[in-house]
Amino acid sequence: MATRQDVALIMVERRLRLWAKRSWVGMVWPIATPLVLLALYLFVFKSVLRVQFHDYPAFLFSGLIPWTFLVNAVTNSVQSISSDADLVRRSRFAYELLPLACVAAAALFSLAVLAGFIVYQAATGHLVYSVVGELVPALVSLYLFVGGLSMLVALFDLYNRDLRWVLGSLLTVWFFLLPIVYPQDRLGHRLSFLRSVDPMSLIIGEFRYALVSGRVFEPIHVLDVFLISVAFFLACLVVFRRVSPQLPRVA
Amino acid sequence: MTGAPLLLVEDLWEGFRVRTDHGSLRRRQVRWALRGVSFELRPGQVLGVVGGNGAGKTTLLRCLAGALEPVRGRVRAAGSVASVIDLYPGASRDLSGREYLRFLAVVSGVSRSEAAVMHDDVIELAAFPAERWSEPVLSYSLGMLLRLHASLALHMRPGLLLVDEVLSAADAGFRTRFLAAVAELCHSGSGAVFVTHDPTLLAEACQRVLVLDEGAITFSGTVSEALASEELVAATSATRPLADLTVAELVAPRRIRSH
């Protein structure tokens, strides 16, 4: 008898296999994406706009790691249920595993990128080893937040197909509202409230503190971010499970 | 036949919200696919479900499989359930046959460890060329997908086997082997429900028949009663009671309509 863990593992395995199919370097793209963005933004901000900023590549990359994970997970999740409509109509299983498998597969790639960046920072003498452990709560918060968001977008797509068309644009707007290519204080007074209401802003802050500044995020802020992410994930899971019996009818 | 029913369906209602032209769901409009369906199936029995297009046959199977939660009424199955309903591989279309089979098995309830070793049994039953198992399932014909799904369902030795009208995609050889395997399964105490438009399948494999029309049962009885009934004539588009037809006419259903 298959356990929920069996189903979860086979879903993730299928995602990884599908990523590699019909592509020469399928597994490489999710890892290459943040590097490509890094090169692009370095060209725009350093070479063209001549922004003067200490250790800008590391600053930029520490924000791109959580962001590209979010983009990979959410864009793959949005049609994760509707593209498996036959599977959903055929048998009953924990349907939330469809978007969560996309998140788990994307998480594996983002961990590989993160490990590479940690090694790079260590090799160049920029890593403060004692604060690397601070990344653990940041990663857990990130996965929970993105997991919740992925369930929500996958569910929304079943009822209204507009989201899949505008998702790219919405993510672009969100990207520029987050302190990824610029520091938080450049956002301006009127938009500074985003720092405290957008969990991604806080999570990126945690990544940057640990990887670039070598400082520890205030414990109370770490707890805040964690609790917000847990609450968000649980709320999304509750909504998803309430709607779940309807999915074979609308998929 | 005696004993507790293998499957008990009581006052089953199932409906779908109507979609607008642009795909949104209407709040209050519901199209009923099943209206108060009740029946039971005993161990060893094969039930044939017949009806025109849109009569609610596949919806009934999805309810029996547990994928659809009834709006009203209840479905009680005594054992495990395996189904051969929707064959399209969806997002899995790029997986090889072997990978897809393993995935499908685990999602259908087979543990990962068992799914890893069951391959040879299913290959034997499905009986298509070994090299095709390495090819993506998107290159498979409907008949091959049917073989894969049906062989997996039989391998699971379910208490209740549900087969949609997709069986019409099977060639004569696989159909014969499949029906023999179902008969053997039912002999050991399981049961099966076949959705079909094919009167020969009713005569060959079923003991009881249900005729559905617009979601309601219009006939329930034995196969010989069904073959003489007007409801079955209407549901299979024949022009006279099927019991009046010769065996040659029964096995060539297209000619029935030309009478």
Image (spheres, coloured by chain):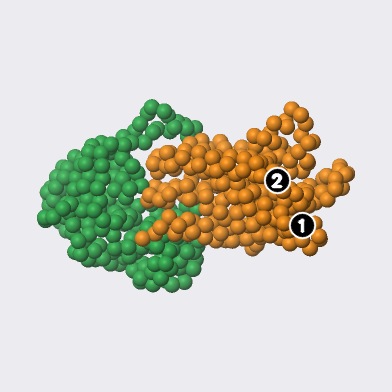
On the image, the x and y values in percent for residue A96 come to 47, 47
Q: Nearer the viewer, residue B229 or A221?
A: A221
Q: Residues within 10 Å of mark 1 (few under 14, many from 20)?
A: many
User: Is residue A153 left or right of A48 when viewed as pictured?
Assistant: left
Q: Chain of mark 2?
A: A
Q: Colour of chain A?
A: orange
Residue occupying image coordinates x 51% and y 35%: A160
Q: Is residue A206 visible?
A: yes
Mark 2, residue position: A217
Residue occupying image coordinates x 26% and y 42%: B74
Please report whichever mark, 1 or 2, sits nearer to the chain's N-terminal start: 1
Q: For the residues marked 1 and 2, what is the alpha-carbon distance in whole angstroms? A: 15 Å
User: Is residue A70 left or right of B16 when viewed as pictured?
Assistant: right
Please check whether the numbered discs 1 and 2 fall on a single chain.
yes
Say what amino acid the circle numbered 1 marks. Answer: Leu
| Number of the label disc, if any, that sits on residue A127 | 1
Residue occupying image coordinates x 20% and y 64%: B188
Q: Chain of mark 1?
A: A
Q: Secondary structure at mark 2?
A: loop
Q: Colour of chain B?
A: green
